[in-house]
């Protein structure tokens, strides 16, 4: 039995029941694939169900506001995916009359769609002979064939793409592509792979040479950047506070947060008081204190945010002040969402 047939046989017996596997509709496949980028299935599944309920068609998603989409996405992370999702839905409606393009080349022209996603949609929705190469596929192929070319290098990306194309089962493209990804997620898992029961173990180089942990090879990651966030949580006598919409090309673009003082290192209460006028324009005397002496470390893929929340009480009436209930309407990063819960319990 060939490699691809073994994968297909394994998949027929072991595939998970997932909501996007009940259809080949490109809208559903696109939505699920965007959500599962850098996200585990267990985390992405409830978001997929929620999005399909709110936006059953690409027209519904296109007609929503970006703020609504970001709010529904809240907690899933990598928010550029949600912004691109919304942008692309409008493009599909306006330029393609609501019909997704059916070729890899055209799909690659859509914002937020890269090689893997274009290949997944083309093969699963349109049965096009395009191989998918995600993290699971890299792991399976590198272990089985004993390939130590770094998967995050230009050479590695090209090599594994060509290899995946050679192995593609043309008789059952969509099932094979889903099968090899599922195989990597369950059987050939990153940690504690199920090698003893693996149908490929007799010819798997990594297993036969006892070098499972060696694969896949990767180039050393870039150094993690440290940033220091000081959020100024303004509270007036009416119990209202204030949020600001993030802009620019930084993290969390178009999400909301409290006024922010970013510093090069952790700072004291005195420094916060001195620099307060840079961020806030308050006329009346105000009281500033830490909400907690604990620094919250929020870890993103390439940066760690060392965060403190400072309570700023003022006699001023905030002109655009928000009550506790109103705060729930705004899309915010998880870091802010968690603090809002504390704020509501302690100050409102």
Image (cartoon, rainbow, N blue to C red):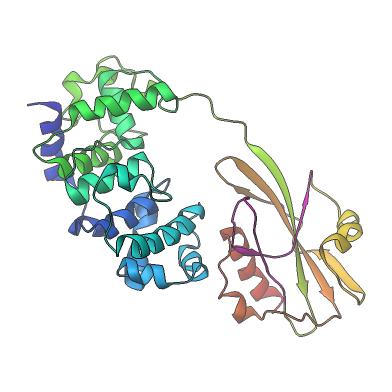
Q: Residue at x 39, y 21 (%)?
A: 214
The N terminus: image quadrant: top left
Q: Quadrant of residue 100?
A: bottom left
Q: Quadrant of residue 233?
A: bottom right
Position of 85 with respect to 32 (left or right) is right
Q: Residue at x 12, y 44 (%)?
A: 13
In percent of width and height, residue 42 lies at 35, 54
State whether residue 192 is above or below residue 208: below
Q: Residue at x 31, y 46 (%)?
A: 106
In percent of width and height, residue 155 lies at 40, 21
In percent of width and height, residue 185 lies at 30, 40
State whether residue 143 is above or below residue 171: above
Front-lying residue, 2 or 112 = 112
Residue sitting farthest toward the top: 209
Position of 194 with respect to 261 (left or right) is left
Q: Which residues are magenta?
A: 241-264
State whether residue 51 is above or below residue 163: below
Label the magenta part by its dominant secondary structure.
loop
Q: Residue at x 43, y 25 (%)?
A: 154
> For residue 260: magenta?
yes
The C terminus: image quadrant: bottom right
State whether residue 269 is above or below residue 242: above
> For residue 256: magenta?
yes
In percent of width and height, residue 25 lies at 22, 59
Q: Quadrant of residue 60?
A: bottom left
Position of 288 with respect to 166 (left or right) is right
Residue sitting farthest toward the bottom: 238
Front-lying residue, 126 or 9 = 126
């Amino acid at each position: 039995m060939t490699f691809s047939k073994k994968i297909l046989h394994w998949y027929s017996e072991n595939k998970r029941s997932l909501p996007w596997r009940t259809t080949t509709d490109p809208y559903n496949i696109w939505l699920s694939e965007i959500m599962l980028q850098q996200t585990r299935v267990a985390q992405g599944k409830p978001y997929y169900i929620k999005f399909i309920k709110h936006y059953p068609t690409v027209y519904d998603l296109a007609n929503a506001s970006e703020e609504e989409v970001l709010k529904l996405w809240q907690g899933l992370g990598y928010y550029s995916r949600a912004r691109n999702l919304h942008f692309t839905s409008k493009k599909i409606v306006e330029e393609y009359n609501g019909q997704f393009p059916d070729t890899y080349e055209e799909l690659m022209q859509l914002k937020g769609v890269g090689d893997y996603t274009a290949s997944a949609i083309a093969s699963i929705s349109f049965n096009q002979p395009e191989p998918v190469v995600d993290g699971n596929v890299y792991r399976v192929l590198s272990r089985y064939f004993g390939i130590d070319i770094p998967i995050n290098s230009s050479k590695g990306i090209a090599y594994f793409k060509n290899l995946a194309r050679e192995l593609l089962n043309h008789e059952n493209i969509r099932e094979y592509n889903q099968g090899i990804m599922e195989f990597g997620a369950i059987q050939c898992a990153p940690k504690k792979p199920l090698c003893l029961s693996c149908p490929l173990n007799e010819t798997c180089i990594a297993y036969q040479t006892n070098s499972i942990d060696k694969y896949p090879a990767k180039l050393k990651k870039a150094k993690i950047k440290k940033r220091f966030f000081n959020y100024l949580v303004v509270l007036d006598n009416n119990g209202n506070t204030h949020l600001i919409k993030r802009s620019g090309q930084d993290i969390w673009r178009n999400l909301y947060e409290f006024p922010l003082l970013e510093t090069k290192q952790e700072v004291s209460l005195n420094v916060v008081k001195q620099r307060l006028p840079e961020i806030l324009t308050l006329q009346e005397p105000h009281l500033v204190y830490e909400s907690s002496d604990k620094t919250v470390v929020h870890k993103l893929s390439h940066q760690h945010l060392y965060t403190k929340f400072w309570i700023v009480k003022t006699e001023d009436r905030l002109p655009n002040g928000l009550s506790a209930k109103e705060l729930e309407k705004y899309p915010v990063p998880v870091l802010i969402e968690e603090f809002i819960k504390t704020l509501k319990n302690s100050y409102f």
